[in-house]
Image (spheres, rainbow, N blue to C red):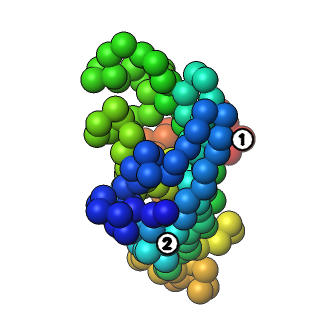
Amino acid sequence: MAGGRTGEPEGVVDLRRLGLVSGGAAQADVPVALHQVTLGGQDYLPDPSDLEARLDVSGAGAGLGLRLRFAADLRGPCQRCLADAVVHVDVDARDFQTTGRDNVDEPDPDLDCEYLAGPSRQELDVAAWARDCVVEAMPMSIFCRADCLGMCPTCGTDLNAGACDCADDAMDPRWAALGELAERLREDGGGDG
């Protein structure tokens, strides 16, 4: 059972169609279209962009246990050298929806799954859940390789391809005053250098 085949939008599953009984469980492969993720002004494109996510739903007296699993790669620029980088994300997310609450129109973030909507909160937006999971699973820094040397801040040469011709001893102008002080101390004999 998957979204799109039964009249609901792509990536949305009507949980009532799973035929779940109290204490039972159901599983569905849901087609999901992932879209680009923009981090720090850089775009990362999912590969594959169309995938099937595995949805597990289990019913208990207190509510529904929800689990979403899938894997994807994201392709975009390395944050050090701007070369192509690939980040693999494995998603295994869980959520919960309580049952038997008096007012289901006002969701409680501690008791209700934020991706459930519709009549009696039975329509699960798997696509939105998957998108949020991808963003949460991405690392803070994305590199083409762990030992990426980046780019020369002066000339922009990719240091992974080789050294540049910039002087190694070029002083940052913000430190110039300290350099002058050190020189004066050496001249006065007050410092060893």
- For label 2, the residue is 51
Is 138 above or below relative to 189?
Answer: below
Labels 2 & 1 near each other (Cβ < 8 A)? no
- For label 1, the residue is 192
Q: Is tag 2's residue or tag 1's residue first in the polypeptide sequence? A: 2
On screen, residue 35 versus residue 51, left or right, reads left
Q: How many dots with numbers?
A: 2
Task: Name the amino acid, label 2.
Answer: Leu
Please name the residue shown 60% across and 33% down the image.
Answer: 22
Task: Name the amino acid, label 1.
Answer: Asp
Q: Residues within 10 Å of mark 2 (few under 14, many from 20)?
A: some
Residue 29: x %, y % from top left: 54, 64
Quarter of the rendering containing residue 160? bottom right
Identify the mark at residue 108; answer none if there is no mark: none
Please name the residue shown 50% across and 51% down the image.
Answer: 18
Q: Please tell me whether mark 2 sits on a helix, a strand or a loop.
A: strand
Please name the residue shown 35% across and 63% down the image.
Answer: 6
Q: Residue furthest right?
A: 192
**Quadrant (top left, top right, bottom left, bottom right) of the C terminus:** top right
In the depicted view, which residue is nearer to us: 181 or 12? 12
Please indicate, yes or no, whether residue 26 appears anywhere in the rendered image.
yes
Residue 92: x %, y % from top left: 63, 51
Quarter of the rendering containing residue 24? top right
Residue 78: x %, y % from top left: 50, 70
Please name the residue shown 60% across and 65% down the image.
Answer: 71
Distance (Cα) linking label 2 and label 1: 65 Å
Tell which tag, 2 or 1, sits nearer the viewer: 2
